[in-house]
Image (cartoon, rainbow, N blue to C red):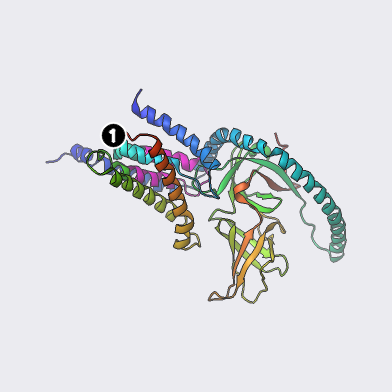
């Protein structure tokens, strides 16, 4: 089976998990972003272009699947995240795994920071409130889930 | 000389990134396009097919407890209704004496939440009523604890309700006791700010906040929340007021869509 079809199939399953499981395990109003994790993984596995294209498409579906006031925001952020994660492609043997992991965490942080930063641009909330109550919890939750997956599923080299 | 093809091939990843960014911005700026909104409504409806059985299963788990709670509530409400009927009759009599215009009678249509969206934050929900059930844009969504939001995007058999917890949601409100008017803006979790309230007005902690009735969407007197902070510390002419909503947005399972009685409503399928 074509690997891109496989990625699309897995992506659809992750999208279903985002619609069902993420809502099930949400804490107050914060849900983990499985799709962002998957886009980071695809960027790391296949490089910038694949990360970017899948990021754009799944981000778009994510935007359309909710009454988002910014259709296009998730596709924008996930394209950037997928592209950024593409820089990690092929680095498994050249850089320390901890540095690799931390780089992925930084990419996740940037993704959450941009998403919530833009989403709440017009809100009366201060940056401190947005950071403490949205960016940080969502980023921490997504990273925790990602780390858990990383601990249980063996990392494949490219 | 480097050909255009070589240039495009060499920088293809960056060109793709630029293209994705441009496309995303085009989408962001065409959010009000009815075709985009229609497509969004259809996608939400498709995703709700996946989420609906799970929510249904979750609901079944709480059914017995919910049933007991509702029976108790029915008794409480019927007692309250009897008292209100008396008050309404008196009110109507007095209004007639004062030659007031008759208020609209309101009707409600129960709706189940079938999708909470895929966004990392909950700011909208999808309900199982749509155009086929007489739902239109800008109808108030409420629960017994108060205002939940309004319908913003209607598909044939489902609609998106923008919640009060959406950063772009604004609601005209007033305090029940002193009738001080303001604009409600959500801040975080179930905390909202009440803006544009003059410092000279009397607002105290514990005051109940209700809808003002100045908008065409929300009828007057719907519960919103309770003031938890009121001070004159801000520079300028306005008070700093915060309130806690009565509605627990993270536990919503059903909502009621408010219609004026004169508007056509189709029975729930």
- Quarter of the rendering containing residue B90: bottom right
* Residue A139: % across, % down: 43, 50
Task: Tell me: residue B2, above or below residue B246.
Answer: above
* Residue A3: % across, % down: 34, 27
Q: Residue furthest top?
A: A1
- Residue B120 is covered by the magenta coloring: no
Quadrant housing the N terminus of chain A: top left
Q: Which residue in the protein does label 1 denote?
A: A157
Q: Which residues are magenta?
A: A54-82
Q: Residue furthest left?
A: B1
The residue located at (76%, 53%) in the rendering is B104
Would residue B142 appear left or right of A31 to someone viewing this image? right
Task: Tell me: residue B115, above or below residue A106.
Answer: above
Label 1 Cα crowd, 10 Å radius (few <14 / some 14-19 / many 20+) = few
**Magenta segment, prevailing SS (helix, strand or loop):** helix
Disc 1 is attached to a residue of which chain? Answer: A
SS under mark 1: loop
* Residue A14: % across, % down: 45, 35
The residue located at (22%, 41%) in the rendering is A94
* Residue B137: % across, % down: 62, 47
The residue located at (20%, 41%) in the rendering is B7
């Amino acid at each position: 089976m074509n690997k891109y079809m496989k990625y699309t199939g897995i992506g659809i399953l992750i999208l279903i998990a985002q619609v069902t499981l993420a809502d099930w395990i949400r804490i107050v109003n914060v849900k983990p972003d499985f799709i962002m994790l998957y886009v980071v993984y695809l960027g790391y596995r296949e490089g910038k272009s694949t990360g970017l294209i899948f990021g754009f498409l799944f981000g778009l579906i994510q935007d359309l699947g909710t009454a988002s006031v910014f259709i296009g925001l998730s596709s924008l952020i996930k394209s950037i995240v997928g592209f950024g994660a593409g820089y990690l492609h092929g680095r498994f043997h050249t850089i320390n795994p901890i540095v690799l992991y931390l780089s992925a965490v930084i990419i996740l942080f940037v993704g959450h920071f941009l998403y919530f930063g833009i989403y709440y641009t017009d809100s009366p909330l201060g940056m401190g409130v947005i950071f403490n109550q949205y960016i940080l919890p969502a980023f921490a939750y997504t990273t925790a889930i990602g780390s858990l997956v990383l601990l249980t599923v063996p990392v494949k080299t490219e | 000389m480097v050909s255009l093809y070589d240039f495009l091939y060499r920088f293809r990843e960056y060109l793709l990134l630029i293209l994705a960014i441009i496309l995303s911005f085009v989408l962001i700026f065409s959010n009000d396009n009815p075709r985009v909104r229609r497509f969004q409504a259809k996608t939400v409806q498709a995703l709700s097919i996946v989420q609906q059985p799970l929510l249904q299963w979750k609901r079944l788990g709480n059914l017995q407890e919910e049933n007991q709670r509702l029976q108790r509530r029915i008794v409480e409400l019927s007692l309250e209704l009897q008292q209100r009927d008396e008050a309404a009759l008196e009110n109507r009599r007095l209004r007639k004496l004062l030659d007031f215009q008759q208020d609209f009678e309101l009707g409600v249509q129960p709706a189940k939440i079938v999708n909470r969206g895929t966004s990392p934050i909950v700011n909208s929900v999808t309900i199982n009523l749509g155009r086929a059930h007489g739902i239109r844009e800008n109808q108030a969504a409420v629960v017994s604890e108060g205002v939940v939001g309004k319908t913003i995007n209607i598909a044939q058999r489902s609609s998106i309700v923008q919640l009060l917890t959406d950063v772009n949601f604004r609601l005209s409100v007033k305090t029940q006791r002193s009738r001080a008017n303001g604009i409600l803006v959500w801040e975080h979790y179930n905390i909202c700010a009440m803006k544009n309230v003059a410092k000279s007005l009397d607002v105290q902690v514990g005051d109940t906040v209700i809808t003002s009735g100045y908008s065409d969407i929300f009828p007057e007197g719907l519960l919103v929340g309770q003031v938890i902070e009121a001070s004159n510390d801000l520079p300028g002419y306005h008070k700093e007021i915060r309130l806690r909503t009565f509605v627990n947005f993270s536990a919503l399972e059903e909502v009621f869509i408010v219609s004026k009685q004169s508007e056509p409503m189709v029975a729930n399928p």
